[in-house]
Amino acid sequence: MNPYILAILLFGLGLGTAITFASSHWLLAWMGLEMNTLAIIPLMAQHHHPRAVEATTKYFLTQATAAAMLLFASVTNAWLSGQWDIQQMTHPLPTTIITLALALKIGLAPVHAWLPEVLQGLDLTVGLILSTWQKLAPFALILQINPTNSTILIILGLTSTLIGGWGGLNQTQLRKILAYSSIAHLGWMILVLQFSPSLTLLALLTYFVMTFSTFLVFKLNKATTINTLATSWTKAPILTSLTPLILLSLGGLPPLTGFMPKWLILQELAKQDLALTATVAALSALLSLYFYLRLSYAMTLTMSPNNLSGTTPWRLSSSQSTLPLAISTAMAICLLPLAPAATALLTP
């Protein structure tokens, strides 16, 4: 792709998110989300591969549906209450419709079906943007409307953690596994949203760091299936020995970074007398942990060529810069000791 066009598209991506962040009016927020969608579509379809075009079309249709729902709900809200302000959502009907529209935008269960399919058709770099940056603007809106209907948030959160765990069990494609992992993590964030928005933000940031690191590892190894991971020890032995730690951090095991948000969220749910919800969420984390362990096992405990892929790819040195990978890996593994500082900052 022409570097000037790429720069314009990335600028549009950033500007769309910034407009949504800065807006207090529903029309401006909707405009920012639309800019975001339109800027990423050429990036998704840039390889002209049938799978990429299919993924782009699916993405466009779901995002257009969600944007139309959002616009409809904000107009309904203005009609019912005379308010266009994002933080003045008083009527339950438009608030619920907007919550569901934003859930569709970020891929929460039960409106998640597009996410694994779309992510599977993209290359890892655009997949990384879709899994991290594209979640920011809708999340900013969810945090601002502060949905009043607590039941719908808990249902969305629990179904996402369960489906994110179950869906990934049977997958061999890494991008689909990461998509289900994304659904499960978003479920955790939505669960605690109404009780502690700052905790949701912490979970979102730690998820970004861990996902960034995982995508960069797969990109360095040029891996898209579990079988190709088994040959990665010949290419980058030290990185291969560190990757299981990143994956287990995504699974939320102590003493890694990923344990911090899960631990604080379970604590908050228990404080709110939602012991059953906390138990189901904690058990669903075990489902996710299984497929992270499966990836770790494939990377570090199986010796190629005894696996199904059989052929070892050429060991060419990658041209990818390893500094972002080094920083994000260190953050994904070592940030748990900062938990007391995080909680001190987050408590109002």
Image (cartoon, rainbow, N blue to C red):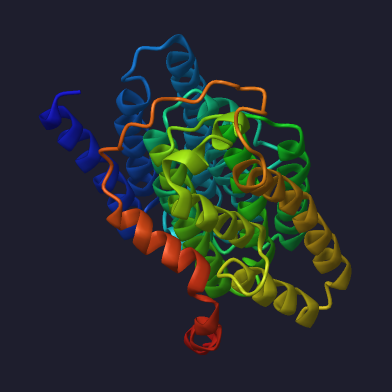
Q: Position of residue 205 (x, y in %)?
A: 47, 64
Q: In this view, does 274 lie above or below 340?
A: above
Q: Can residue 48 be seen in this view?
A: yes
Q: Which residue is drawn at 66% across and 67% down?
A: 192
Q: Residue at x 59, y 55 (%)?
A: 244
Q: Which residue is drawn at 60% across and 32% down?
A: 304
Q: Where is residue 155 in the image (x, y as percent from the top left)?
A: 77, 52
Q: Which residue is drawn at 44% across and 60% down?
A: 329
Q: Where is residue 294 in the image (x, y as percent from the top left)?
A: 71, 44
Q: Closest to the observer: 348 or 341?
A: 341
Q: Is residue 186 above or below residue 276?
A: above
Q: Is residue 200 above or below residue 136?
A: below
Name the image quarter holding residue 180: top right
Q: Closest to the observer: 37 or 284?
A: 284
Q: Can residue 81 be seen in this view?
A: no
Q: Is residue 74 above or below residue 248?
A: above
Q: How many marks?
A: 0
Name the image quarter holding residue 91: bottom right
Q: Closest to the observer: 135 or 245?
A: 245
Q: Position of residue 116 (x, y in %)?
A: 60, 31
Residue lying farthest to the left in this orientation:
4
Residue lying farthest to the top in this orientation:
50
Say left or right for 288 vs 50.
right
Say left or right for 254 vs 131.
right
Quarter of the image with the N terminus is top left
